Amino acid sequence: MCPHDKIPSKDYAVIQEVHEMSTVLTSPMTPDDLLRMPDQGKGYELVDGELKEINVSYLSSFVAGRICTRMSTHVDQCNSGWVSPEGTSFQCFPDDPNKVRRSDTAFHQLDRLTPEQARSEGHCTVVPDLVVEVVSPNDLAYEVNAKRIEWLDAGAKLVWVIHPEQQTIHAYHADGSVRLFKKGDTLTGEPVLPDFRVPLEELFRLPAKM
């Protein structure tokens, strides 16, 4: 095209629109973008400016719901803090302020989360004391490990990684120690939930006809 030729106005408008769309599609997503998605982006996390779909199964959600119920009952009785359910979003990672992760269950001790912070709209910016990750069949081991490390590096004191299929739980502590709970064991929450107890048999028991 000769530099003196003029682009028709309607064609220029189309070119401009395509350019703007391209810019939007290639720009990193932000935590606010995630909140503007339908249902506030439920089912997605935000890592390195990109959406990351969360792998779930009915069994993993079932187990997450059960552990959340047990924890909530205990915490309510002790008045020891806040329990948040599966899908709660957290923007609390110092290495990447725009990273958003979702826990399967989480617990904040009473002195870590104020009512004002709990009422704030958007992603929670206070790292939980205890994080629960329930592994689904399509989860990759290195991704599960990466999330566990991220939670601990951000300041979590304890991370439970629950494997429903194997009926095991690995408890990762901030001091680097790890404890394996398996069939016949009783899950405990020291030092975050010192009086919490739930037998693994109860946690992994599936509904059955009487």
Image: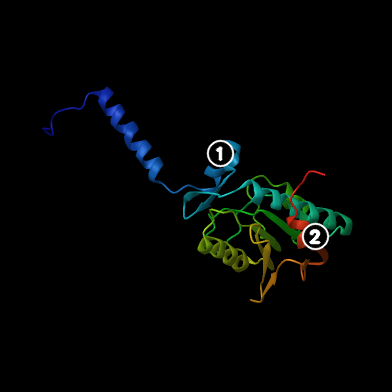
The percent coordinates of residue 140 (x first, y second) are 51, 59
Quadrant of the frame with the N terminus: top left
Task: Tell which of 43 and 17 is nearer to you.
Answer: 43
Colour pattern of the rendering: rainbow
Q: Is residue 30 left or right of residue 111?
A: left
Residue placed furthest toward the front: 210
Q: Residue at x 47, y 51 (%)?
A: 49
* Three-letter residue code for mark 2: Leu
Q: Is residue 20 visible?
A: yes
Q: Is residue 75 left or right of residue 36?
A: right
Q: Is residue 35 left or right of residue 129?
A: left
Label 2, label 1: how far apart the Cα atoms are: 30 Å
Quadrant of the frame with the C terminus: top right
Q: Residue at x 47, y 55 (%)?
A: 48
Number of residues whose C-alpha sits closer than 10 Å to that of mark 2, classed few (under 14), some (14–19) or many (20 or more): few
Q: Is residue 88 visible?
A: no
Residue placed furthest toward the left: 2
The residue under label 1 is: 36
* Three-letter residue code for mark 1: Arg
22 is higher (above) or lower (below) than 118 = above
The residue under label 2 is: 110
Q: Residue at x 61, y 58 (%)?
A: 92
The percent coordinates of residue 172 (x first, y second) are 66, 70
The percent coordinates of residue 39 (x first, y second) are 60, 38
Q: Is residue 15 left or right of residue 207?
A: left
Dot 2 or dot 1, earlier in sequence = 1
Q: Secondary structure at mark 1?
A: helix
